[in-house]
Amino acid sequence: MPRWKRALKILRQTLVIILITAALAEVSFRIYARINPTFIFYGNSYNRYRAKPHSYDYDFQINSKGFKDVEFSAQKQPGVFRILGLGDSFAYAIVPYQHNYLTLLEDGLKADGRNAEVINMGIGGTGPRDYLSVLVKEGLELSPDMVLVSFFIGNDFTDPSVERPETDLYSYSYLATFAKYLINVGTKYSEQPNTATPTDFEQYYDDKPTFVDDHFLKLEIGRSEIFKKESELFQRQFTEAAGYLKQIKDICDAHGVRVAVVLIPDEVQVNKALQSRVMQIKTFTVSADSFDFTLPNRMLRDRLKELDIEVVELLDDFTAVGADTALYKPLDTHWNIAGNKLAADVIQKALFRDTAKRAVNSSAPAQR
């Protein structure tokens, strides 16, 4: 047999082996994702982002429901004021459990003498439609007295659950999606898992960057489109996101549950140096006068007021304190320990003024 025919035969056999291997890998990934939903692969369920039950987040063990909280009973104890915390990765938090603003809120309410319980049902990577789903599918059965929705200005308007963007072609293949995930891990994070020591994953470093600078800046540049004035795209995104909040309000009203929304500012709204870097890029094509970094907050605040929903606006406090104190983890987009502490303080003062006043006027020591 001529050499070129032998080479062609070997090539054909190699291609067949590659195709069979790829097909088996595709089927295996799809079976795995069906049994164990994961954020890596595309899907409509918020469960793909839920933490694995009984896994660890630093030194804290995730509860049996896959939430970053202690175990809780579906049956509410008599006299307990139960608050459900809904939100994305801000509610889940990148900081350890004891520094999470929802944990600190519960601690603060107990210190003020209120028998309160805050159940953290935050799931990273989710959006307003998912908050509604979590409430209906898992929250209402817990008999809450209050629902606290954490709405992140940075991406809760543009989250896929609201915007429904066109799906990238590679996402139709689970094998290709997994390969893309490995590439992202290798190029976007400041430290790679394969070079970090086990100790690095067991400890939290408040001043350690998460992303490389280039990726972080691209994230903030992309998000800044929501601050553009007279944007028809944002108007549509705003209407749909606000619609999900209205549905949450309607459901809570029907069950006699108090509801409040916390407006979480994007770092680009608070960090003027970052805002300047973003605008240096944006103004290559658009005038700086076309942007208003408080616009989404004002619009949503006004809409929630129309819906008779309580609002906690964090922007002013974070801007004032952020002028001298870092409130976001470096190159990350999420709050650090100080940011979580400030958020807990502002939320408690805004929504539970009566307990704060009672604590101040009382001569009895605070109870925990």
Image (tube, rainbow, N blue to C red):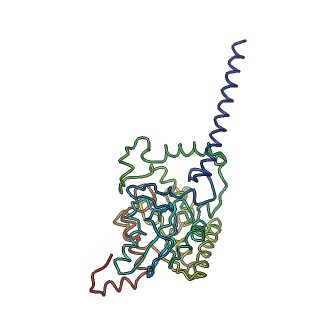
Q: Is residue 269 above or below residue 29?
A: below
Mark yes or no: residue 166 visible.
Answer: yes
Residue at 40% across / 79% down in the picture? 115
* Relative to 101, 245 lies left or right: right
Question: Which image quarter holds the N terminus?
Answer: top right
The image quadrant that residue 166 belongs to is bottom right
Residue 167 placement, left or right of 336 = right
Q: Residue furthest top?
A: 1
User: At which x and y percent is residue 197?
Assistant: 37, 43
Q: Is residue 228 visible?
A: no
- Residue 249 vs 46, above or below: the answer is below
Left or right of residue 67, residue 173 in this image: right
Q: Residue at x 58, y 53 (%)?
A: 37
Q: Nearer the viewer, residue 138 or 186?
A: 138
Q: Quadrant of the C terminus?
A: bottom left
Q: Is residue 338 above or below residue 83?
A: above
Q: Who is closer to the viewer here, 69 or 239?
A: 69
Residue 270 locus on image (x, y percent): 43, 66
Q: Nearer the viewer, residue 333 or 221?
A: 333
Where residue 90 appears, as percent x and y from the top left, is 47, 64
Q: For the point 67% across and 24% down, which residue is it? A: 11
Query: How many numbered circles are shown?
Result: 0
Residue 212 percent location from the top left of the image: 45, 49
